[in-house]
Each structure stands twice: as C-alpha cells, then as structure tokens.
Image (spheres, rainbow, N blue to C red):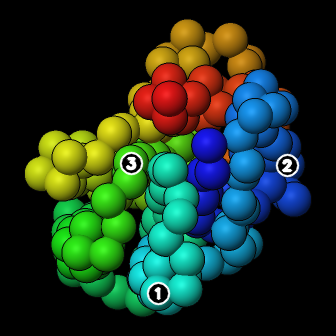
Amino acid sequence: MKVLFIGDSIVEGSIGVSFTDIVAGQNPEMTLVNHGIPGDTLPGICRRLLALLVREKDFDAIVIEGGHNDILMAPWLGGGGSQGIAEQLGSILDQTLNRVKQVYRGRLILATLSCLGEERDSRENRIRDGLNQIIHGLAAKHGCRLGRGGEAFDAELEKGEGGDGLSLTIDGVHINERGAGLYAREVSRVLF
C-alpha cells in the first residue's frame, strides 16, 4: 500500500515527534510518501497536492493535514473574524477536493487539526474549531474518511492530566510523543 501524507510541519515531523514515522513503523508493508513542509499554509498544501497528482497518481490513499499555520498567521492577514477565516480555508479545501476527485480515485483522508497552545478557549482554537467543523462537512460531502486527531487532542486536554504545562506538544503546536501517538492512532483507524 502506497500512502501520500501531505501537509505542514505536523506531517513533515522534524520538529517534535513524527506521527507519520509512527504510522510507518506500525505498518512496515506500507510505502509512506511524506510531503510535509514546515510553515506551509493550506493554500500551499492544496497547490502542491494538485501539482503532484499531475505527475503521480498511484497512491492507494492520500492523507491531507493543514491549516495550523493559516490560523497562527490570521491576526496579521485579516480575514473577517474567526468564522470568516475558517470559511475561507474551508472554501479552498472544498475547491481542491473537487479538482482532486477529477484525477484521483483512491482513498482520501482529511485530518482534523490539533489544539493550538493547548488552550481550548483561545481565539486561535475558536478558528480551529470552526475549521474542524467544516472539515467534517467536507469529508461527508466528498466521501472522504476523517482522521480525528483534533478530537483526540481535545479529549486528552479535557482530562487535565498535563498539569499546568504542555502535555501533547513541545511548544503549543508541534506534537510530542503523546500527541504524535494520538494523531497516528486516529489516522491509522481510517487508513486501512
């Protein structure tokens, strides 16, 4: 099985712990193609995916993760408030999925986003919550599977076992061993 993971630094995995390495280690028969780029935005990820599918379509599955950087840059980019930013990103992903489905017939997996800063009530996480809701809707609309990493993060944070420090990330964004384990578990549930 050949699987493309495309996204930002969460996919690329050199900062913090790589969830893609965990998925690959648990599935040695799988060929994992990692197209994560630290700092990339959802529009950049979508452009790269479309360009890649012009050259190569032989993936059994494609996992798409992105949006963290867009949300973190939102205060500097404007965007019409929390819901406006989520809707803009959702529109970009929707248009991309329409185009992807014209050229690719394999399994598509959309990953929800993990909590930023591990503080559920922040402005960034209100945007993230809105985008995750849109990702759920797009998965249903386009027949994609849903890797529920964001929901797994939220459930762990609600337990409050991390104390006052960071429990799932090394810096509020990039995932640590626990966070990577959650992402790997949730993506693996829908990968096969």
Residue at image x 81%, y 32%? 28
State the image quarter where residue 19 is shown. Answer: top right
Q: How much space separates mark 1 and mark 3, taking CA atoms?
A: 17 Å
Residue at image x 50%, y 34%? 191
Q: Secondary structure at mark 2?
A: loop
Q: Amino acid at mark 2?
A: Gly
Relative horizontal placement of residue 123, taking residue 21 as reference (left or right): left
Q: Is residue 44 above or below residue 189?
A: below
Q: Amino acid at mark 1?
A: Val
Observer-side mark, 1 or 2, equals: 1
Q: How much space separates mark 2 and mark 3, taking CA atoms?
A: 28 Å
- Could you say which disc has been placed on residue 28 in the image? none
Q: Secondary structure at mark 3?
A: strand
State the image quarter where residue 50 is shown. Answer: bottom left
Which mark sits nearer the N-terminus, 1 or 3? Answer: 1
Q: How much space separates mark 1 and mark 2, taking CA atoms?
A: 32 Å
Which mark sits nearer the N-terminus, 2 or 3? Answer: 2
Q: Residue 45: image x %, image y %?
A: 51, 76
Q: Is residue 176 above or below residue 64?
A: above
Q: Residues within 10 Å of mark 3 (few under 14, many from 20)?
A: some
Q: Which residue, given by chain and number where applicable, does mark 2 sit on?
A: 16
Which mark sits nearer the N-terminus, 1 or 2? Answer: 2
Q: Is residue 185 above or below residue 62?
A: above
* Total residue callouts: 3
Looking at the image, do the residues carrying marks 1 and 3 touch, with CB atoms under 8 Å apart?
A: no
Q: Amino acid at mark 3?
A: Arg
Q: Which residue, given by chain and number where applicable, does mark 1 sit on?
A: 54
Q: Which residue, given by chain and number where applicable, does mark 3 sit on?
A: 107
Observer-side mark, 2 or 3, equals: 3
User: Front-most of 60 and 69?
Assistant: 60
Q: Residues within 10 Å of mark 1 (few under 14, many from 20)?
A: few
